[in-house]
Amino acid sequence: MSENLIDIYIMGEHHRVPDSLTILQALEYAGYRLIRGVGCRGGFCGACATVYRVNGDYHLKFALACQTRVEPNMQLAMIPFFPAHRPRYRLSELKGTAQEVLTIYPELLRCYGCNTCTKSCPQDIDVLGYVSAIIRGEIANAADISFDCIMCGLCVSRCPAELVKHHAALLCRRIYGSRLAPRSQHLKDRIAEIKNGKYTEELSRLKKMELKKLQELYAAREIEPEE
Amino acid sequence: MSYPSPLQELIASVNQTRELRLKQTFPRLSAEEKEQLLKQFHPDYRADTFATLEIGPNAGDRTPKELARLLQADSPLQPVDVNLNRFDFETDVLVIGGGGAGCAAAITADDRNARVIISTKLRLGDANTMMAQGGIQAADKENDSPAIHYLDVLGGGHFANVPELVEALVTDAPEALEWLENLGVIFDKNPDGSMKTIHGGGTSRRRMHTCRDYTGAEIMRTLRDEVKSRPGITVLEFCPAVELLTTPDGEIAGAVLLNLNLNRYLTVRAKVVIIATGGSGRLHYQGFPTSNHYGATGDGLVLAYRVGAKLAFIDTMQYHPTGVAYPQQIVGQLVTEKVRSLGAQLVNSKGEQFIFPLETRDVVASAIIRECAQGKGIKTPAGIDGVWLDTPMIEILRGPGTVKRELPAMVRQFARFGIELDKEPILVYPTLHYQNGGVAIDPECQTGVKYLLVAGEASGGVHGRNRLMGNSLLDVIVFGRRAGTTASQLATQRSAEFTPSLNHLFNWRKLLQEKKLTPETCSPILLPDYTRKSNSGVSTQSIS
């Protein structure tokens, strides 16, 4: 494929790169061998949070470098690390109340609803929505809204009230998962059965079984239909 | 619609046959048909891409050339580089690798009052665990059992798996889920608390547990947060291990780390070392693109091999059937198997199904490679082959809105390039996904080298010659916890009197000389190099 080269500015430094690349690939094309600002390269780890402007446009834009194609005349910088405060708490020592979240992160109450966080989220999460939910004491709701958060920290970097919301959201999810979500009876039952040795004998029989018999058993196994 | 018009025209044939295909189930292949397909089209069978190891515990065994080169390389470390009379850190347990297995091991060892250090190449949690989307298996439903799970694992692995490891995997599985829930992981559930479960390739029961399509991310961020909340665990980020330390008797005694920020070696004296470094997709075997994270360069295999640990199943890699083939920017990234679990079929250029979508991964990947080799693939504008994955079917089968609800990460990933998953099919081709083998371990994660444990993708034997979807997340939790338990026990038993040295390295270099091997590279390589000068002008993730 023919390469259409465009101008970009990496921390102010001019480079010409193919317009088909992601920002991350463009950095490498330009010669950067990255240690920070790169992780999973698949949009899940939040290592490559990037801010940019396109020359001539005052708007600040936000992206994951591994998931975003370069644009002509973009001026970009990565924010591979942003100071974020995580108070020392142990989940096992918490009761799991909404009040506790606000005791651990009292600054959440400083939120004045500017919505800058939501605008800066590369995952399009309603960040203000979950912060408001936490303030209202709705842990389940906050866990649900924030679920797709990859903790890149862009919302934290932009918050004028200095909130470390992605950590507060993680606390809500952990409280929900460990304390509020209904537990599975079938899981409890199975763990008890295993502890009581219900499957020990069958498994040791399978472990010793000759190959041919195993293959037959496998081929003949009943397959549960789709719902 | 962001597909260029030639591709849009081809999509028409997928749309045309959809109604008919909805009524058809493609027949599953027999064992003989599978073997035939694998032999003809699976990359593991391309003999010219393999090399035979000449030195070390696996001398005489076959492995991909790219891995052989690193296993038989020299260490970057010279004895003068480090002072082994005093150590930067001393600890009971050193965990190398900060992914799912490493964090599970660290938490478990900390529970048992061992002093723990995690050293990790990038940030804590930068690991393949973070990227696992599809789910985690456990036989916890009434119609299921560890024995049925056992049989699925074994069949998927072509009956080559180590039985004791499979037994450990399936027996610990339900408890692993409970452990994760207690740490705060949110599984998809029905209102009564029962788990929502689906099928995966090669499962005979619906036992795939999910956290939307962020299953691995949800597990990883929870484990990471738990590690950070424990004062007994020290985390050293950007500090990959470059060499292990051994006593004159060949027992493990610690490791040498490289601080990547400061380019400085650090020494750790440790009673027990757990290697949890994950896989090696970034070695791009056979030129394949990969779904793996940036640091997946097989370091753990190299470190373990040089101290004499035996590797197992290093001649088999997993190519995930559905890597992205278009758009070009994200080629090789994963399209989760959950898409097929939800009902999407694979379709060739003629609009025909050609394989049952939930055959095991090696079989489905081979079928896709066959279609493309036989001219029934679709060429993207970048010249890459692919077949269609008919995602809009999911909306018809399971109701409108299912795609957005069940696959938010994928919807987001494709929407960034203007493709709407619920309305348009996507193009996929196999991508290098998993290292089926690794360091041989026993069910307690012990290797043949005393005080060296291995857990997770860096280990070999659990999955035999092919891993099933959802058994990798399970593996890292089950064997991570087992490694943590074993490590804390060994640390208690071991006397504090031992002398770390680089003796094994002298032996290794002697061996290289004897065999007249003059390696051009040092290993571990730590990171791939995608800069333009080293990569003939192409800086995409795909070297192919």
Image: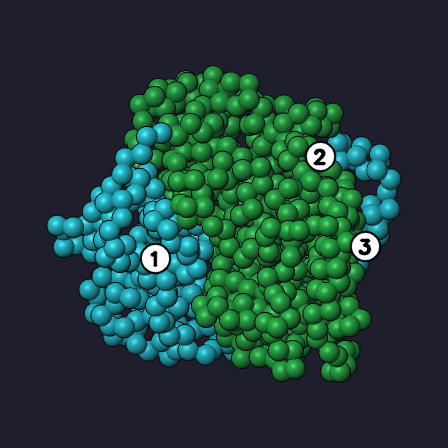
Chain colours: A cyan, B green
The residue beneath circle 3 is A200
Q: Which quarter of the picture shows residue A167?
A: bottom left
Q: Residue flagged by tag 1: what amino acid is it?
A: Ala
Q: Which mark is residue A222?
A: 2
CA–CA distance in space, label 2 to label 1: 47 Å
Q: Residue flagged by tag 2: what amino acid is it?
A: Glu
Residue at point 46%, 20% (across, down): B349
Residue B467 versus residue B392 in the image, above or below: below
The residue beneath circle 1 is A49
- Answer left or right for A222 relative to B200: right
Q: Nearer the viewer, residue B412 or A182?
A: B412
Q: Between tags 2 and 1, which lies in front?
A: 1
Residue B183 versus residue A92 in the image, above or below: above
Mark 3 chain: A
* Residue A136 image point, x, y percent: 31, 68
Residue at point 14%, 55% (across, down): A58
Q: Secondary structure at mark 1?
A: strand
Can residue B367 be seen from the camera position used here?
A: yes
